[in-house]
């Protein structure tokens, strides 16, 4: 599937990959993900796309975005848009499909193999366009959940399909790391509470 002489680029639909991994019951270790694809060929770029709510004082995704930015990923963000639909419900929209598609087409002449982390059927035409340029396309998503996380037309169009469930051992975060981080966080919060009480005295 991969040739070690190939120039590879990763295009990660952040929200889609997060939802896929969550549905499979594990977290992605982005350091291991990068290492996995560096071992398969010459990894030219790794793009990560996500929308951010800019009006929030704290966003739970911000630490991940910062870490990715400093550790080998090119992070592409844009602010979410808030609107009220016809029935009066407040909706938040944060679609990064156009940005991802533009970057894929810009990079298509510089790479041999595109790896798309998404199951979104809207990318089928993009995959076809890249293939017409003579590039291989691998799509990473899953068939292991109900409902399926990948559109059938995208899976059929790709040269190769990789089920994220089969990559768990290579790119999944060790569950003990999460327990350790939660324990460290709880200990830090206890320390901060103790420190604040000492200041008051």
Image: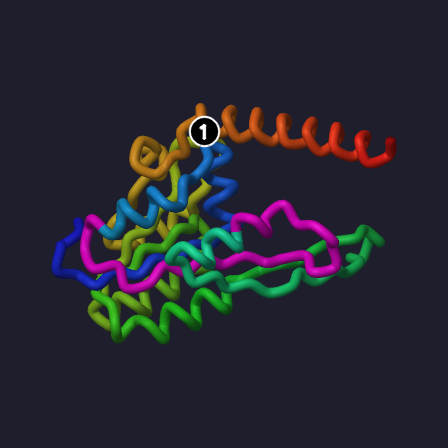
**Corner quadrant of residue 26:** top left
- Give the residue drawn at x 30%, y 71%: 108
Judge from the rendering whether residue 49 lies leftward or rightward of residue 107; answer left or right: right
Which residue is denoted by mark 1 in the rendering? Answer: 177
- Give the residue drawn at x 19%, y 55%: 41
Badge 1 density bin: few <14, some 14–19, many ≥20, Cα 10 Å: few
What quarter of the picture does the C terminus occupy? top right
In the image, is residue 40 part of the stretch drawn in magenta?
Answer: yes
Q: Nearer the viewer, residue 76 or 128?
A: 76
Q: Nearer the viewer, residue 86 or 70?
A: 70
Is 56 rendered above or below residue 194? below
- Give the residue drawn at x 43%, y 39%: 28
**Corner quadrant of residue 142:** top left
Judge from the rendering whether residue 41 lies leftward or rightward of residue 173; answer left or right: left
Judge from the rendering whether residue 76 lies leftward or rightward of residue 12; answer left or right: right
In percent of width and height, residue 105 lies at 36, 73
**Corner quadrant of residue 31:** top left
């Amino acid at each position: 599937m991969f040739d070690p002489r190939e120039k590879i680029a990763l295009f990660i639909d952040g929200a889609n990959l997060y939802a896929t991994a969550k549905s499979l019951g594990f977290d992605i270790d982005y350091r291991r993900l990068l290492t996995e694809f560096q071992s398969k060929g010459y990894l030219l770029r790794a793009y990560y796309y996500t929308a951010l709510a800019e009006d929030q004082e704290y966003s739970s995704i911000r630490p991940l975005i910062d870490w990715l930015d400093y550790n080998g990923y090119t992070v592409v963000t844009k602010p979410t848009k808030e609107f009220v639909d016809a029935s009066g419900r407040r909706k938040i929209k944060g679609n990064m499909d156009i940005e991802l598609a533009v970057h894929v087409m810009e990079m298509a002449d510089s790479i041999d193999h595109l790896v798309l982390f998404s199951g979104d059927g809207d990318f089928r035409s993009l995959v076809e366009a890249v293939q017409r340029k003579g590039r291989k396309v691998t799509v990473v998503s899953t068939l292991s959940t109900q409902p399926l996380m990948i559109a059938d037309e995208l899976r059929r169009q790709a040269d190769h399909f990789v089920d994220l469930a089969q990559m768990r051992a290579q790119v999944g975060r060790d569950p003990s790391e999460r327990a350790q981080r939660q324990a460290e966080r709880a200990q830090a919060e206890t320390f901060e509470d103790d420190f604040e009480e000492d200041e008051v005295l």
